[in-house]
Structures are given as structure tokens and as C-alpha cells.
Image: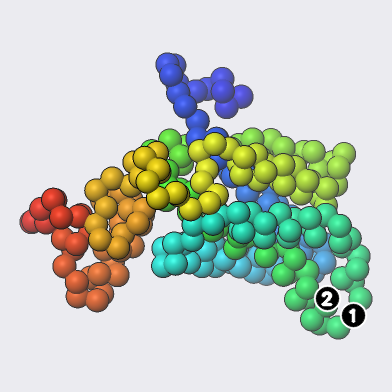
Amino acid sequence: MVWRFLPKGRVRIDNRMFFLGAAFMLLETKPVVQLALLFGRTWLVNMMVFFTMLVLILLANLYVLWFRPVRLVWYYTGVLGFLAAGVLVPLDVFLGGGPPWHYVAPCFLALGPMLFAGVIFARSFQDARDPDRAFGSNIAGSVLGGLSEPFSMPLGFRHLLLLAMLFYILSMWSPRGRLWPPRRGDGRNESLAPHLGPGRPGARGPSSVGHLAWTWRDRALGRPETQLFGRHKPPISG
């Protein structure tokens, strides 16, 4: 259906962002359903689940902006490990026990993958050559993830995470993704970051999220913004 409504002409989909969107759509379904079954489907439970999701996504974006992780393979390992644990651990084991086991453990298991998934998405989007195409591919992937949710009827919500794991593996396998640091002297990797200023790996100009983050930080520290554009670009006036 997504392919049917693509514009005419040569259109390239960002494979990695596409599968990340599909996987995250399934990933966010699990905590809503699981915690509603444990604590009741009330407005307070749903509010706390979505609030925690947004906080974890915000923390993941801040982590990427400040620490700039390169080895995404470790974050893929984390999210796949959490999803595998979610498939193997049945929900009824959390019905007994004290408050830490009944409340903390299922929340950690259901919401833990959000942090790793947020880091993978933020870093992948930061490395995208065409942010518009990357974001559009991610939205198209979320449509695929939404259309995959009815598989929970024959599979169950626990085993629906197997499909999310498949999407994450496909995004990791995607040739556009970079799981390991670039080799020094590799022309293909060096071309991904043109016009870099000193100490600004991965920035791509005024439209980049990373550029805006460095701008805000340099303003807070009282540094001139001309450092962000490299040595050959004049400062913005007016």
C-alpha cells in the first residue's frame, strides 16, 4: 500500500529508517497492552506509560547529541536482548511477589527497549544524507508496523515482538546503516560529513539536528557561532 501511493518517478526509500519505523510501532504497542493487563486499563496507567516513553526518547536524543555514539551494534544488542526477554518471560510471573517484582520489573522489561531504540533512531537520523527522505521513510515504515499489529491475534502480543526483532535485524542489515566507526582514509565515509568544523564530527550544516544542538551549547558557553561552519564559511549576519 505504501508503494502504491509513492510519487511517480525514481524514488529511493531509506531502508534503515523504514524498518526502524515499523519496528518501533510494534515496540510501543507492547508496554501499553502489558501494563494495562497488569495494572488495569485506566487513564492513569496509559498516561504514565506514554509519559515514560516520551521521557526515554528525550533522554536518548540528548545522549546522542552530547556523547555521539558510533558503535550502534551495542545498542542493537540491547534492544534485541530486551525483546527476546519479553518473548521468553510470560506475563503471569509478575502477578505475585512484592512491589519491586510486581511493579518495577515489568515496567523495566516493557519500557527498557525504548532507550536503545531511541539512540538507534537518533543516530541514524543524524547520519542521514537526506533528512526529508529519511523521515518520510520512517513514517512509511510506521504504517507497515501498524498494519502488522493484527498478527497479534494469531501470534499473541508476546510473540509479536518476534516481528519487531525481525524489523530491527533488517534495519541493522541495511547497507545504509553504519554499525561500526568509519575507517580512516575511507573516502565513502569521509564524504558523509562535508564542511566540518573543528571538533564537530557528523554535523551537516544549518538544517542538521546536530548543528542546532551545537549552536545552543556554544551560545550557552559564550562561544562564537562561526566555529560551527568550518574555516571557509562566513558567519551569518542579520
| Tag 2 residue | 102
Drawn side of residue 169 relative to residue 105, left or right: left
Please give the residue where the numbered disc 1 appears in the rendered image: 97
Residue 168 position within the rendered picture, expressed as x and y whole percent measured from the top left: 65, 45
Residue at point 23%, 70% (across, down):
219
Q: Is residue 102 left or right of residue 234?
A: right
Q: Residue furthest left?
A: 238
Rendered image coloring scheme: rainbow
Q: How many marks?
A: 2
Residue most extreme to the bottom: 98
The quadrant holding residue 50 is bottom right
Residue 5, can we see it?
Answer: yes
* Residue 41 visible in the picture: no
Is label 1 in a helix, a strand or a loop? loop
Question: Which mark, by number, is residue 88?
Answer: none
Q: Are marks 1 and 2 in contact (CB under 8 Å)?
A: yes
- Nearer the observer, 9 or 31: 9
Q: Residue furthest top?
A: 9
Instruction: Give whichever of 29, 203 is nearer the camera.
Output: 203
Seen at 43% across and 35% down, the residue is 133
Q: Residue at x 71, y 54 (%)?
A: 80
* Mark 2, secondary structure of its residue: helix
Q: Is residue 83 above or below residue 171?
A: below
| Rendered residue at 77%/38% (across/down) | 150
- Amino acid at the residue labelled 2: His
Quarter of the image where one finds residue 8: top left
Q: Where does the image place residue 207, in percent across and percent down from the top left?
A: 30, 48
Classify the position of the N terminus by image quarter.
top right
Amino acid identity at mark 1: Gly
